[in-house]
Image: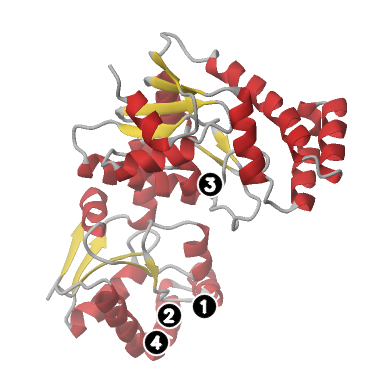
Amino acid sequence: MGIEKIKIEKFIELSFRFPVLDVRSEDEYGHAHIPGAFNLPLFNNEERKVVGTTYKQVSREEAIKIGLNFFGPKMSQMISTTEEIVAQEKNIHKTVLVHCWRGGMRSAGVAWLLDLYGFKVYTAIGGYKTFRNWVLDFFQKPHQLKILGGYTGSGKTELLDGLHKRGESVIDLEKLAGHKGSAFGNIGLPKQPSPEMFENKLAVSVLKKQNEFPQAPIWLEDESQRIGTVNIPEAFWNQMRSSPLYFLNIEFEKRLNYLVENYGKLDHTELREAILRIQKRLGGLETKTAANALLDGNLRECFSVLLKYYDKHYFKGLNNRPDPKPSIKNIEAKEINIEQNINLLFEK
């Protein structure tokens, strides 16, 4: 059916319709990849090292011979795996996208095999390296955003989900990061993606939303630049800080009730470890008070100390936005009620 080499922009657009086969090794893929791609390694980690060493120390020709010895026995299984992926994706066109690190011999070899079998194959000019350049360039471009703000415990994540269900353009940064944004944000959650993978996921998510809602701004939660172990790219974060802010204003006691109900269920040992991790910023007395209250089972006192700290921290960030200051709409919410607060967001 043919092999077609295409630029990365078209490759990404087609990736929303057809499966992407990343033929790099498991470690390369595991570190970061195009979101949604399947790993179909031409060489595993050890084989890649052998081929690479031979290429550098002996010759290109000898490396190719060794690579073919590794590739040959895998051919049939690679075709079967691709058929399974195509069936799983309900891809009636038998079309696949293939890439390696630089768009070189690895993707060319797999593309040749799949084309020979009868697949329509697109390969990315420049491979994953070009995709990464696209990601970094993408964040430099202007993006139309709306920011949902509010002190800790205001139910912002639930409100974003409600906006999504209403048909608004929404991206949940904390979900992409695998972290809820505070010292307690990773308790009970799996390991976060690598910083590079987070950037990949964010860039592709923004592009998808822009394709789905061409004229609409994207709703995002007001976040610190750092979310656990990953960072929002600086250029994109600066745009967030300059975008219209909708500040959800909910009284302290209501937010405290929300935190006790939701975070009080978490493992208390992990909660205590999280408190100790922010000891320098929280202060010795406040750390001792919160930790002792947790040990005594007094969750309300424990979270009250922490909530005052996070309110102070957020207030500082709220007032430290760049000039010219973005427009801020205060949403005076009486309760953490998703439907009511969504209606308040859209009041004139």
- Residue at the spot x=82%, y=28% of the render? 286
Instruction: Confirm or deny contact between disc 1 and disc 2 (CB under 8 A).
Output: yes
Circles 3 and 4 in contact, beta carbons < 8 Å: no
Q: Quadrant of the C terminus?
A: top left
Instruction: Check disc 4 and report the residue beneath it.
Output: 74
Residue 41 lies, in percent from the top left, at 42, 74
Numbered label attached to residue 195: 3
Q: Quadrant of residue 114?
A: bottom left
How far is disc 3 from disc 4 in space, using C-alphas? 32 Å
Horizontal and vertical percent for residue 119? 18, 77
Residue tagged 2: 67
Looking at this view, is 80 or 162 the one in front? 162
Instruction: State the CA–CA distance, disc 3 to disc 1.
Output: 27 Å
Q: Is residue 121 visible?
A: yes
Query: Neighbour class for label 3 at 10 Å: few (<14), some, many (≥20)?
Result: some
| Residue at x 53%, y 46% (from the top left corner) | 195
Task: Give neighbour class at mark 4: few <14, some 14-19, many 20+ (Cα, 10 Å).
Answer: some
Q: Residue at x 76, y 27 (%)?
A: 281
Q: Nearer the viewer, mark 1 or mark 4?
A: 4
Residue located 45% across and 82% down the image: 66
